Image (cartoon, helix red, strand yellow):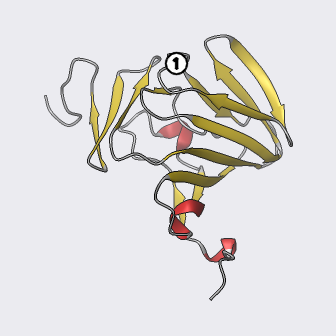
């Protein structure tokens, strides 16, 4: 059997696991987990389709994981602490683990954008969200969402 992936046959994941109301800007994003489909366990590679008006994530940074994005098609705006930069097909950006400069992509154009997302595939990591009251901790491959004060989402 060959190693070639049939990308069209890979299951798409829509939206996110963010609690309300943080899920709204990412509700229509579509991700295909390419590395997982290939059986890879050390890196994550995801094909992201970002519709007009959609965000890739809430603005965040990771404590343990490096991230890299490459725009395959369309146009997005990279939002960081440094401001906004337009990215088009062929543009790329990288985000080093532990750098607290939060980032995300927004599609402000009238057409879909297609982005390749690459990062470490770790069983433990923490993502911090500078604009909202959210911390996402990956503990033994399970995501735990808390408020900044440590309260779990859903607790009073």
Residue closer to the observer: 88 or 95: 95
Q: Position of residue 69 (x, y in %)?
A: 68, 39
Q: How many marks?
A: 1
What residue does disc 1 label? Answer: 99
Which residue is rendered at x = 51% and y = 31% of the image?
A: 58
Q: Name the spot of residue 25 as percent of width and height, x first.
A: 55, 37
Apparent side of residue 13 relative to residue 146 in the rendered image (left or right): right
Q: Is residue 53 visible?
A: no
Residue located farthest toward the bottom when viewing the structure as drawn? 1
From the viewer's side, name the closer residue of 76 and 70: 70
Instruction: Name the quarter where the C terminus is drawn.
Output: top left
Residue ranking furthest to the left:
156
Q: Is residue 85 left or right of residue 106?
A: right
**Quadrant that contains the N terminus:** bottom right
The residue located at (41%, 33%) in the rendering is 21
Query: Toward which corner of the image does residue 134 lie, by quadrant?
Result: top left
**Residue 81 position in % (x across, y down):** 61, 12
- Residue shown at the point (74%, 28%) measured from the top left: 77
Task: Please determine whether, in this image, residue 46 is positioned above or below residue 131.
Answer: below
| Residue pictured at 56% horizontal, 69% vertical | 38
Would residue 74 be found to the left or right of residue 103 on screen? right
Circle 1 sits in a helix, a strand or a loop, which is it?
Answer: loop
Rendering quarter of residue 105: top right
Q: Which residue is more in the foreground, 115 or 64?
A: 64
Within the image, what quadrant is residue 11 found in? bottom right
Q: Is residue 51 visible?
A: yes
Q: Where's residue 33, x and y in %? A: 55, 60
Q: Is residue 19 left or right of residue 3?
A: left
Crowd rating for badge 1 (residues with CA inside 10 Å; few <14, some 14–19, many 20+): few
């Amino acid at each position: 059997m060959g190693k070639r992936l049939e990308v069209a046959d890979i299951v798409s994941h829509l939206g996110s696991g963010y609690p309300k109301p943080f899920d709204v800007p990412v509700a229509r994003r579509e991700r295909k987990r390419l590395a997982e489909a290939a059986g890879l366990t050390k890196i994550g590679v995801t094909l992201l389709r970002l519709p007009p008006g959609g965000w890739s994530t809430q603005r965040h940074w990771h404590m343990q994981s490096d991230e890299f994005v490459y725009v395959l098609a369309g146009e997005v705006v990279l939002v960081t602490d440094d401001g906004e930069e337009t990215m088009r097909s062929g543009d790329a950006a990288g985000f080093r683990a532990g750098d607290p400069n939060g980032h995300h992509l927004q599609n402000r154009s009238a057409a879909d954008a297609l982005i390749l997302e690459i990062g470490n595939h770790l069983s433990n990591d923490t993502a911090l969200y500078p604009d909202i009251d959210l911390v996402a901790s990956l503990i033994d491959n399970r995501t735990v969402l808390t408020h900044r004060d440590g309260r779990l989402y859903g607790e009073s």
